[in-house]
Image (cartoon, rainbow, N blue to C red):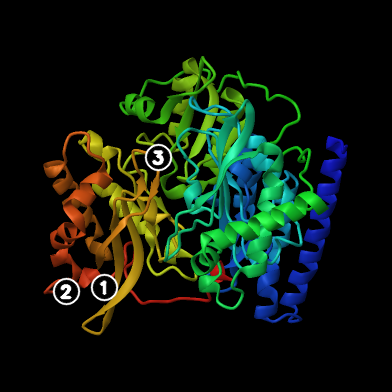
């Protein structure tokens, strides 16, 4: 049995060797010894994306399960200051991204991450991406069991492995321990949902889900799999994907396309054959332990912070009561609460990162939990600390209420930095926040808006009650930014994942108008007890197309329609090489 010391030493040695190799490869590329095409796969494996801006990179940091220690969050803040103009971005896969980083300093950045056992390895490219999970793992009031150890085991098992280093396309895994699937396993290549059967821990497994331009909902692979077989079953599915995935057409390379083309029964039969071979002849080892810090793992129980943050409490702000109502929830352990730090569209400054790290250390369990909705959770907080914490969040400009409400909008960066971004989604998000913020209707406030800058679904637009993805149209010979409007996505009352219905494409500047019209119609016509999706289905797509028809192609073009949100110059479609599909 390996000790924690030997596991950590071996991991650090592997990481060091990989970073040393990458540094030499970067230097060789800058010296002209690699072409762009030769170097692309090298850097993408290390989580280093090209941007539409020449000479700079986007760096994606993996945070398994979204669990970060206070020390790791402070290191991310230091990295933001040193390499990324003091800014970071939280993603729907619980990652932290840095933008506009010159390639020459990327090896230094990766070295800084490795000091706190964070990695960017396989955060991009055709690999097993960051393994995501319930941000309330270990504290949820309706939790079956804490999935964190099993999530970390899977994430660690498939890191730095030849099998997962060059798949036909990306492979995504999620874990959820709650009764409701808050980790949306249905959109993943493999989704694990905690179950207990005959007193034994295990998981219901779904497979072959995915979003993108053509979404597919995952199907049930196993009703129950014992926890000790997680890595084996994952490896069996990955082997099938590696053998039969489409390596010629990246647009049809995801696991879901194998199922579409060959049938679910065929796919399951192949998985069972690979699984039997692994059980008989061995496969990748399931790690008994992971290094300290990996996925915020600690071999010792975490100490709860009980240190004072402010010597004198300030007067309460008028928004404090709303923040208490929307951002603070009970956790499973009596006497403690979990609070949500609302991070508009996932954009943080280094000062904000340090503030949440300080709160988590002084008043929580020392962990900062990144959610799939681009927010942060801090748990193990005592009720009598909330005024103090709110004051610190106010100072950091992170005290906004309304977490998980309609103005808590999820977006990707879009054309702000992404090569495939058509529209500037974050600017649309700000416009929509102004439109729906502090909405007086209680049921409207429970809705969710999700937006992407292109059809590839980084903003998970298919899952929003109201969704948008960017596109473009020519009107009178000139390009205008548009958004496809979707309605009715999310999880239904049975807990089943449902994708939104496509309504129609509208000019970007008309999106807030369309949202207002839909909400007004919803308020006027909903029935008691009816969900938003049920309302959409009752009125059917044509109702909403008619409701917004005059916005599609206005008779008279307002010059403002030629501008994207946040721009002062006329919109022009500019796409680079699609590295997220590389």
Residue at mark 1: 562
Residue 124: quadrant of the picture: bottom right
From the viewer's perspective, is the residue at label 1 or at label 3 nearer? 3
Instruction: Provide residue 107's location: percent of width, then percent of height.
Output: 73, 61
Instruction: Provide residue 284's location: percent of width, then percent of height.
Output: 78, 52
Residue 277 in view (yes/no): yes
**Residue count near mark 1 (Cα–Cα under 10 Å), binned few <14, some 14–19, many ≥20:** many
Earlier along the polypeptide chain: callout 1 or callout 3? 3
Q: Secondary structure under badge 3?
A: loop
Residue 514: quadrant of the picture: bottom left
Q: Secondary structure under badge 2?
A: loop
At 78% across and 43% down in the image, what residue appears? Answer: 287
Residue at mark 3: 495
Viewer-proximal residue among 38 and 202: 202
Instruction: Tell whether 344 sits left or right of 113.
Output: left
Q: Are marks 1 and 2 in contact (CB under 8 Å)?
A: yes
Q: Secondary structure under badge 1?
A: helix
At 25% across and 59% down in the image, what residue appears? Answer: 511
Q: Are marks 3 and 2 in contact (CB under 8 Å)?
A: no
Q: Quadrant of the N terminus?
A: top right
Earlier along the polypeptide chain: callout 3 or callout 2? 3
**Residue count near mark 3 (Cα–Cα under 10 Å), binned few <14, some 14–19, many ≥20:** few
Measure the alpha-carbon separation of dots 1 and 2. 9 Å
Instruction: Tell whether 119 sits left or right of 336.
Output: right
Badge number at residue 557: 2
Relative height, residue 422 to residue 91 (above, below)? below
């Amino acid at each position: 049995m390996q000790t924690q010391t030997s596991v950590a030493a071996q991991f650090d040695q592997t990481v060091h060797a990989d970073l040393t190799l990458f540094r030499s490869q970067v230097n060789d590329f800058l010296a002209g010894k690699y072409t762009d095409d030769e170097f692309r796969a090298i850097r993408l494996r290390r989580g280093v994306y090209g941007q539409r801006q020449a000479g700079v990179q986007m760096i994606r940091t993996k945070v398994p399960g979204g669990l970060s220690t206070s020390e790791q969050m402070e290191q991310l803040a230091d990295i933001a200051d040193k390499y990324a103009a003091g800014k970071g971005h939280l993603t729907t896969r619980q990652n932290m991204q840095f933008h506009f980083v010159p390639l020459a300093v990327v090896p230094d950045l990766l070295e800084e991450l490795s000091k706190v056992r964070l990695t960017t390895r396989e955060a991009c490219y055709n690999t097993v991406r960051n393994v995501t999970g319930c941000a309330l793992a270990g504290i949820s009031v309706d939790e079956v069991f804490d999935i964190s150890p099993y999530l970390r085991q899977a994430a660690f098992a498939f890191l730095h492995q030849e099998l997962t280093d060059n798949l036909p396309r990306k492979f995504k895994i999620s874990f959820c321990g709650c009764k409701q699937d808050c980790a949306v396993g249905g959109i993943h290549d493999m989704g694990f949902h905690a179950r207990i059967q005959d007193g034994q821990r295990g998981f219901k497994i779904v497979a072959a889900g995915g979003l993108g331009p053509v979404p597919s909902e995952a199907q049930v692979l196993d009703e129950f799999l014992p926890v000790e077989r997680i890595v084996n079953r994952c490896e069996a599915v990955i082997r099938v994907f590696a053998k039969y995935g489409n390596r010629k057409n990246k647009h049809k390379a995801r696991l879901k396309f194998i199922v579409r083309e060959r049938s679910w029964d065929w796919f399951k039969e192949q998985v069972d054959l690979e699984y039997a071979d692994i059980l008989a002849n061995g496969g990748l080892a399931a790690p008994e332990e992971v290094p300290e810090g990996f996925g915020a793992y600690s071999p010792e129980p975490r100490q709860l912070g009980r240190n004072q943050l402010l010597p004198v409490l300030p007067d309460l702000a008028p928004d404090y009561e709303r923040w208490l109502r929307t951002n603070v929830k009970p956790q499973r352990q009596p006497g403690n609460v979990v609070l949500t730090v609302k991070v508009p569209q996932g954009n943080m400054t280094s000062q904000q990162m340090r503030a949440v790290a300080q709160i988590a250390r002084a008043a929580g369990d020392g962990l900062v939990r990144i959610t799939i909705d681009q927010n942060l959770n801090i748990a193990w907080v005592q009720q009598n600390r909330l005024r103090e914490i709110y004051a610190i969040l106010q100072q950091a400009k992170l005290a906004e209420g309304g977490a998980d409400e309609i103005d808590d909008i999820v977006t990707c960066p879009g054309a702000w930095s992404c090569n495939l971004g058509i529209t500037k989604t974050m600017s649309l998000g700000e416009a929509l926040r102004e439109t729906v913020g502090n909405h007086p209707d209680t049921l409207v406030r429970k809705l969710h808006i999700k937006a992407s800058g292109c059809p590839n679904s980084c903003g998970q637009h298919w899952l929003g009650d109201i969704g948008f993805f960017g596109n473009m149209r020519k009107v009178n010979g000139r390009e205008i930014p548009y958004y496809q409007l979707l309605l009715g996505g999310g999880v239904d009352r049975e807990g089943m994942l449902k994708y939104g219905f496509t309504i129609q494409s509208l000019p970007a500047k008309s999106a807030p108008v369309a949202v207002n019209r839909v909400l007004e119609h919803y308020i006027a016509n909903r029935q008691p007890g009816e969900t938003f999706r049920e309302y959409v289905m009752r009125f059917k797509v044509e109702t909403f197309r008619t409701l917004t028809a005059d916005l599609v192609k206005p008779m008279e073009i307002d010059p403002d329609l030629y501008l994207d949100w946040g721009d002062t110059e006329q919109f022009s479609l500019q796409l680079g090489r699609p590295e997220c599909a590389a």
